[in-house]
Image: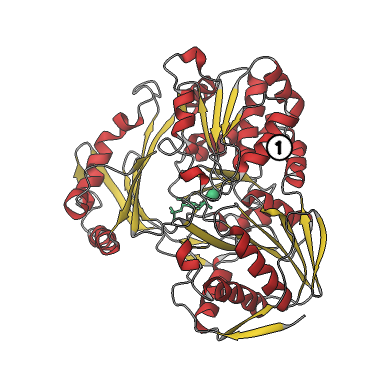
Amino acid sequence: MKTNVIDTTPFDDQKPGTSGLRKKVEVFRQAAYLENFVQAIFDSIRDNADAPENRSLVLGGDGRYYNREAIQIILRMAAANGFSKVWVGQGGILSTPAASCVIRKYQSFGGIILSASHNPGGPDGDFGIKYNTGNGGPAPEGITDAIFACSRSLKSYRIVEAPDVDIDSLGSHALGEMRVEVIDPVADYAELMESLFDFDAIRGLIAGGFRLCFDAMHAVTGPYAREILEQRLGAPAGTVINGVPLPDFGDGHPDPNLTYAHELVDIMFNADAQAAPDFGAASDGDGDRNMVLGRHFFVNPSDSLAIIAANATLAPGYSDGLAGIARSMPTSAAADRVADKLGIPCYETPTGWKFFGNLMDAGKVTLCGEESFGTGSSHVREKDGLWAVLFWLNILAQRHLSVEDVVHSHWAEYGRNVYSRHDYEALPSDVANDLMAHLKNRFGELPGKRLGTYTILFCDDFSYVDPVDGSIATGQGLRFGFTDGSRIVFRLSGTGTEGATLRIYLEAFEPDAARHGADAQLALQPLIEIAHDLSQLQQRTGRLAPTVIT
Ligand code: VG1
Ligand code: CO
């Protein structure tokens, strides 16, 4: 089989963001664009660890537009770069948590995941690529920095000349010297879930008339949810809606929040409350996010992490308790209160799952979570949408309460961290950067200043020293802390592909959870006004309201 070494000019925009490299499909389809980045991954593995020769790789994606073409290119390049074996999900499909599961189970050297997560797909949408290491988790910054450096200096890439591999047929295929093992994308993952949760109890709950609805948003979790919820747990056919993965996600935005998962939201907030199911959930493009709803009730992801932590021992996989909890900095401190009570450590990391890996590998934490609908544990090294759904079902099966009652009883015991995130999408980059610079310029004058009924205690630009390897991440979000423990955080997204997205995270601690009812926006109104004043938001952006409120 012929190997071609193709001369190329590097691109200077291949810097991985919060979660890999994400660009418009048309950018990825430029000649040599994907190839250069993949070669940069292979070269930096060679520079940073052992040579990739005789190494193995897991490969799969969320099925979005360009997934299949990209898989064939990467297979041919892996063969040309001396890999001996690649496990590919059938049809090129692997959810992000399933890819992590498979990397760990087969002890692969690493994996490549093709996804732009919750970003829209299709020919005009987004595509993405991410490298995961042998622990199953996103490559840490040291490796992503090395990949970026490589991507800027590379002069050629290697690829074999060969026809497409049949990735739709299970089993072993040859590509030159390399083996391509096409595996069932669901089986290994479903088996792992059965080992963690009490499937008998959940089956009993469902058989007893408990009704649920899972919205796969035409993204990757459809086949996983059907197999686990409908086949193994006995939920009726039709429990999973939008269950067929489509390259353009049915023209939707596969982001499980109150704005984009509107079909599920309409079902769960049906005007006739009795017609609404007991439990609703949705997952994103690549299956690592989750939104959990009760009947007429939204569970904030920060609360969800805290509630899973407080109830963890109800699930067989966690019956021995938790080593610790980690949450990203913008996530509310609800989980910290649970950790306090359990007497276990709680770590605060920058945004992005890659910061949790070292803590889990070192056995310091069992549960991790982010406010952005991401929850997971050390069963894999990615956040995991269906895992969170099963955890909730396991809790509900044991506690015999509604979703709303579980949340209310949690607030009654721990107090409530009232929380919301406001996103301003597609701002001009210079406007967003200037706004952040303006906020930083004010750091000196703000501490001690009274704003309405609030007094600023501190402001800083969050930085993090990894307690395991000592690596440092700076510039991770501007924090404004108030004397009563309330908090505002400003951060620019690292996953968007159009201009800049400003995220404003608002949090107020409320010991008397009953005081504002469930309305977080009302409770947070004074902090929202302070955030607008501090940042001169309207005057700088011209925006009167956020694009998305969570
Ligand atoms: C967003 C979320 C962050 C999450 C990241 C990847 O990043 O805020 O919490 O880790 O997406 O999630 P950003 O930089 O846009 O705020 V996913 O589901 O894209 O892998
Ligand atoms: Co995702």
Farthest residue in the front direction?
A: 163
Q: Is residue 196 above or below residue 512?
A: below
Q: Can I make out residue 47 in this image?
A: yes
Viewport quadrant of the C terminus? top left
Q: Is residue 369 above or below residue 500?
A: above
Farthest residue in the left direction?
A: 539
Q: Can I make out residue 324 in this image?
A: no
Q: Quadrant of residue 469?
A: bottom right
Is residue 270 left or right of 388 when viewed as pictured? left
Q: Quadrant of residue 396?
A: top right
Camera-nearest residue between 534 and 155:
155
Q: Quadrant of residue 192?
A: top right
Instruction: Find residue 441 and report its horizontal and vertical position in percent.
Output: 23, 62
Mark 1 is on which residue type? Tyr
Q: Is residue 198 above or below residue 173?
A: above
Residue for point 77% across, 25% down: 200
Instruction: Find residue 474 and report its horizontal and vertical position in percent.
Output: 43, 65
Residue for point 51% across, 68% down: 29
Category of crowding for the residue at label 1, using alpha-carbon neighbours closer than 10 angstroms: few (below 14), some (14–19), many (at least 20): some
